[in-house]
Image (tube, grey):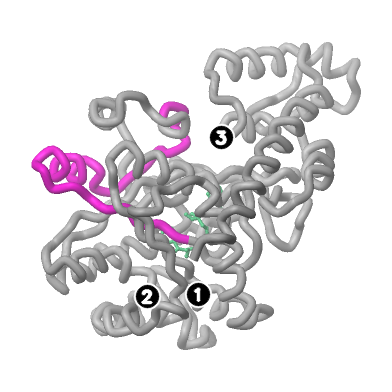
């Protein structure tokens, strides 16, 4: 966990102005170097926008994953979702990246829906609710176009007969003092929470169990999930499995000031189920890096570095580096006014949602 005066990053809370340099140190992860990117590019042909722009920026053992791959020992992918509500655009970031990895490396993907986790960590949610959000969120995963022959999505509750015995093996190797140190568990934490980290470790070796031999596993996620896999990396070798590797991204900020994206503040995030009208309204009401008046903005320029509108373009909505650079420069120079910038983003978001929602509807026909 990382708790500083100005920001907090835990698997359950992300808030404040995140200092990613500090996180690299706190978590002890490695930066994705230009050399590593070159190596990846050797296999993928081009680099995904999120890598090129440094938005996937850290990893554990990515070099080893490529060593194994080059030796003819391919990896499988594992990622997931804690279904506490509808999917927002931030969740789509690591999933889109995972889809790209699947396509480029031909990997199998295990996708875990931790409906148990969200029940245990959210006092207001029943198991029925988290289980039903697991289904809703799975529609978004399917809509992103993963290879159906190589992708398995499961809910912990529904798949517990397979997961539980394996989680027990992991749990037996994790002490209470470890969960206190890594996850900040306290005496008043419910005991399900203390157990849960063993469940999130299971898909990191499930494919090895199934195939009866060790298979490398690569886990894409935003950096908040790293504590889970730090523990898994400690325990799995003691059970005879490989340490899982990971590739870690930054957070898409919220639309409100300070970048917080929160389910309890619906205006702060765009959900995949939002209507076009709602989504556009959220964009048009977003906080920006602009000045108080148009005249001031023309004179002083705006600050795209703190502006969610600009960040949404960077993460998801402007693939063309030249156009993005141009937007940045025009914002800074006071030429691109926030109203116009928001309008461009609102149109892009609406077009994305329209197409995504059609695919989401289609996904309902699948099992
Ligand atoms: P959850 O549901 O909090 O988040 C799902 C995935 O989205 C990432 N994420 C974000 N990425 C970019 N911008 C954001 N604003 C943003 N918010 C969340 C998370 O890092 C995560 O990758 N316990 C997990 C579920 C899980 C899982 C996994 C996640 C189970 N196994 C393996 C990753 C890998 C959870 O509650 O995720």
Disc 2: CA contacts within 10 A as few (<14), some (14-19) or many (>=20):
many
Asked if residue 180 shows in the view, the reply is no
Question: Which residue in the protein does label 2 denote?
Answer: 199
Task: Specify start and end residues of the magenta stretch as a single range.
Answer: 52-80
Disc 1: CA contacts within 10 A as few (<14), some (14-19) or many (>=20):
many
Q: In the figure, 161 relative to 110: above or below?
A: below
**Residue found 58% across the figure and 16% down from its top:** 325
Mark 2 and 3 residues: CB-CB less than 8 Å, in contact? no
Helix, strand or loop at label 2? It is helix
Left or right, 81 with reference to 332: left
User: Is the CB of the residue bearing disc 1 within 8 angstroms of ligand 1?
Assistant: yes
**Residue found 42% across the figure and 31% down from its top:** 48
Mark 1 and 2 residues: CB-CB less than 8 Å, in contact? yes
Please state the horizontal and vertical placement of residue 203, each as a whole percent of the image. Answer: 32, 66
Extreme residue in the left direction: 71
Left or right, 298 with reference to 160: right
Question: Which residue in the protein does label 3 denote?
Answer: 315
Please state the horizontal and vertical placement of residue 317, each as a whole percent of the image. Answer: 61, 31
Q: In the figure, 298 relative to 303: above or below?
A: above
User: Is the CB of the residue bearing disc 3 within 8 angstroms of ligand 1?
Assistant: yes
**Residue found 70% across the figure and 35% down from its top:** 351
Please state the horizontal and vertical placement of residue 315, each as a whole percent of the image. Answer: 56, 35
- Residue 67: in magenta span: yes
Earlier-in-chain disc, 1 versus 2: 1
Earlier-in-chain disc, 2 versus 3: 2
Asked where in the image residue 67 lies, by quadrant, the reply is top left
Helix, strand or loop at label 1? It is helix
Q: CA distance from mark 1 to mark 2?
A: 9 Å
Question: Which residue in the protein does label 1 denote?
Answer: 117
Helix, strand or loop at label 3? It is helix
């Amino acid at each position: 966990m990382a708790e500083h005066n100005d920001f907090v990053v835990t698997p359950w809370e992300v808030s404040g102005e995140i200092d990613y340099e500090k996180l690299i140190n706190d978590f002890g992860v490695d930066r994705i170097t230009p050399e590593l990117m070159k190596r990846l590019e050797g296999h993928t042909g081009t680099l995904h926008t999120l890598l090129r722009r440094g938005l996937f920026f850290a990893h554990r053992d990515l070099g080893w994953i490529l060593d194994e791959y080059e030796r003819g020992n391919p990896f499988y992918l594992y990622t997931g979702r804690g279904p506490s509500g509808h999917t927002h655009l931030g969740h789509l970031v690591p999933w889109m990246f995972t889809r790209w990895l699947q396509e480029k490396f031909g990997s199998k993907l295990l996708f875990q829906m931790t409906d148990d986790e969200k029940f245990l960590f959210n006092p207001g949610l029943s198991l029925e609710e988290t289980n039903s959000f697991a289904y809703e969120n799975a529609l978004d995963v399917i809509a992103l176009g993963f290879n159906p022959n190589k992708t398995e999505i499961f809910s912990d509750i529904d798949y517990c007969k397979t997961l539980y015995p394996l989680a027990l093996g992991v749990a037996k190797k994790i002490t209470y003092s470890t969960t206190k140190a890594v996850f900040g568990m306290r005496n008043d934490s419910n005991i399900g929470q203390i157990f849960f980290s063993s469940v999130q470790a299971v898909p990191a070796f499930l494919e090895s169990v199934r195939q009866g031999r060790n298979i490398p596993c690569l886990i894409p996620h935003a950096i908040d999930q790293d504590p889970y896999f730090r523990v898994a990396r400690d325990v799995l070798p003691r059970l005879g499995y490989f340490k899982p590797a990971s590739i870690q991204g930054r957070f898409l900020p919220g639309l409100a000031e300070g970048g917080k994206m929160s389910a309890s503040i619906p205006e702060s995030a765009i959900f995949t189920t939002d209507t076009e009208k709602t989504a556009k309204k959220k964009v048009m009401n977003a906080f920006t890096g602009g000045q108080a008046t148009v005249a001031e903005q023309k004179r002083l320029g705006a600050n795209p570095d703190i502006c969610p509108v600009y960040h949404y373009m960077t993460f998801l909505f402007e693939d063309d580096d030249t156009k993005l650079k141009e937007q940045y420069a025009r914002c800074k120079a006071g030429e691109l006014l926030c109203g116009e910038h928001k309008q461009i983003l609102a149109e892009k978001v609406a077009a994305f949602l329209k197409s995504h929602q059609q695919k989401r509807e289609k996904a309902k026909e699948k099992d």
